[in-house]
Image (spheres, coloured by chain):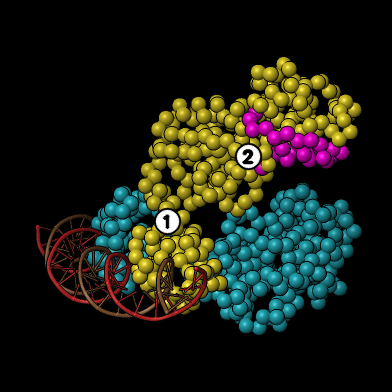
Chain colours: A yellow, B cyan, C brown, D red
Amino acid sequence: MELSDLVTFAAVARTGGITRAAEALNTVQSNVTQRIKALEAEIGTALFERHSRGMTLTGAGRRLLPYAQRMAALSREALLAARDDGDAKGPLAIGSMETTAAVRLPAVLASFHRRFPAVSLTLRTATTAELATAVLEGSLDGAFVTSPIDHAELTGITAFREELVLITAQRFDSLASLRAGTAESGPTALVFRVGCTYRHRLENLFATLGWPSAARCELGTLDGMIGCVAAGMGVALLPRTVVERSELASEISILALEPQFARVETLFIHRRSLHHPSALAAFISSLESEESEIAA
Amino acid sequence: MELSDLVTFAAVARTGGITRAAEALNTVQSNVTQRIKALEAEIGTALFERHSRGMTLTGAGRRLLPYAQRMAALSREALLAARDDGDAKGPLAIGSMETTAAVRLPAVLASFHRRFPAVSLTLRTATTAELATAVLEGSLDGAFVTSPIDHAELTGITAFREELVLITAQRFDSLASLRAGTAESGPTALVFRVGCTYRHRLENLFATLGWPSAARCELGTLDGMIGCVAAGMGVALLPRTVVERSELASEISILALEPQFARVETLFIHRRSLHHPSALAAFISSLESEESEIAA
DNA sequence: GCTAGCATTCTCTGGAAATGAATACTTGAG
DNA sequence: CTCAAGTATTCATTTCCAGAGAATGCTAGC
């Protein structure tokens, strides 16, 4: 059972046919047929059901497929690991939530770039859920997301601690006065798209306050959201640091929350793997050395 | 980079020489030399440092080795997974702590064997630490251990909840009276060998009680331990169920503890893998169906 | 019944892997 | 200092297998 056999097996499984798999692998039909047959003979079971329109996996094939994929991924990673001489260089794809990117990352990235100029870093912003998926599938090397993240393939360190605050155009001293000053169904919630943990938090908060069906307005950008709040469109839930550094800080007012709603940890997550690329290891060590950033 | 190349690479790394590796792989020196050279050419780096007495890994080799081992293990597992037709049969190696084996397992194993007679089950007892290692390295398919177990490669379910009690020959109503009734340095602690979680608990308890350096006596068997307690040799920490079902139950007395010391969960742990052998899956489902066993 | 798309079978060939013998190097013992 | 024992490497040779290409057989849909 060689790796190349498993790769052809996976190709047939993916394309659903030997002809198509052969095309994808830049080889000939007959060849693929042979390899599959040999693999089936070695294992002692049929891996595919043959029918006129292609091939579908049998039970044994379905069980084998994840192994084939895993091993192929490992072999790619192994090559990189062996070639990685320890110098942090080359591309490094990092993801981040919008809010973290706005306030926390400039300092981190600048210092990282100063220490490791050979790494060409790219930053992408998205929601926590999207980022976790991207890290898992390998399109990102690491990402800043909101805890908790519970996946066996992922691990991470606490990068920052944030205090979430409610922001409004009018001034309110407490949740009670906010409640008194708005409609029965609650104020409009200005949120990022689904998958954002802050949105989830705000929805929980609204549910606790008895506004389960308050109006929502999805914004795509941080500045847009703060601007809309300043314009009196509704309320939003954002880290205090983000709000205070905004240009519009003077036009909005901040309502602090109980710790259960306010406290969030920003984690830097990455895949568990047998060897971290030097660029990633450098980034993590750079992050750790800036521990002063972790506000209490 | 084929699997067979990685296997030969791992063999050379393990044996420390091409000649020895060739012997282990049932092939000739020249062959191994060629494969290693080809592998090094493909990767673009030397994997070994050659010296007169053999070969040692370079940095690149050290980084590659875990991948080679992992992929070899995966390929073995893949073969089993593909061949596993879903019928629970064949060997199943289970480990357990002595106490769990004595009280909880007889019922579980009997019912399992009734439902899946084709599985030939073997049971081995050891300490939590030893069992976790054995499961990780594959010599056991699963094991009953004390929580918490925190390892990314392991997962498990809660199988039983136990109440740990202190047992003594003389009757004591409370920890205070035990303290009053024994020497300044504390009573002798009867414990299993290092690696046993109950021993660890008892040592913590003793430290809390101000007996950090109380005498210890290591016993190898459960019956021996209970016997020694009955004979007035010292105190032990064991699950209540174990003590109550002992033949010597009438000759020892039980001292209940605060939940922080008393509560333990017995987990059934196993490796995370892409496919669980049917025999193991059957065991787990059998365990889950006996949920009534999980006392509150 | 015909055709398009598919898998299978067959033969042939090139190249890679295994073999076995010969070579070169190092080290430790006599 | 020489020899023996161990090591890795090189080379010529054989063996064997994966890939190419053509032919065949199968099924579904028109």
Which residue type does callout 2 highlight? Answer: Thr
Under circle 1, the secondary element is helix
Say if residue B122 shows up in the picture. no
Q: Nearer the viewer, residue B69 or A254?
A: A254
Q: Residues within 10 Å of mark 2 (few under 14, many from 20)?
A: many
The single residue placed furthest to the top in the displayed view is: A250
* Residue A242 at x, y percent in the picture: 66, 26
Query: Which subunit holds the residue at mark 1?
Result: A
Q: Are marks 2 and 1 on the same chain?
A: yes
Tell me which segment is drawn in magenta.
Answer: A195-222
The amino acid type found where label 1 is placed reads Ser
Q: Which residue is mark 2?
A: A127
Relative depth, front residue between B110 and A63: A63
Query: Of marks 2 and 1, which one's residue comes earlier in the chain?
Result: 1
Q: State the separation of the CA atoms marked 2 and 1.
A: 30 Å
| Vertical position of residue B29 compared to residue C26: above or below | below
Residue in view at x 48 percent, y 65 percent: A16
**Residue B19 spot, x, y in % from top left:** 28, 66
In the rendered image, which quarter is residue B296 located in? Answer: bottom right
Question: Disc 2 is attached to a residue of which chain?
Answer: A
Q: Residue at x 87, y 30 (%)?
A: A183
Q: Quadrant of residue B133?
A: bottom right
Task: Inspect the magenta stretch and tell me whether residue A116 lies in it.
Answer: no
- In the picture of the structure, the residue carrying the numbered disc 1 is A75
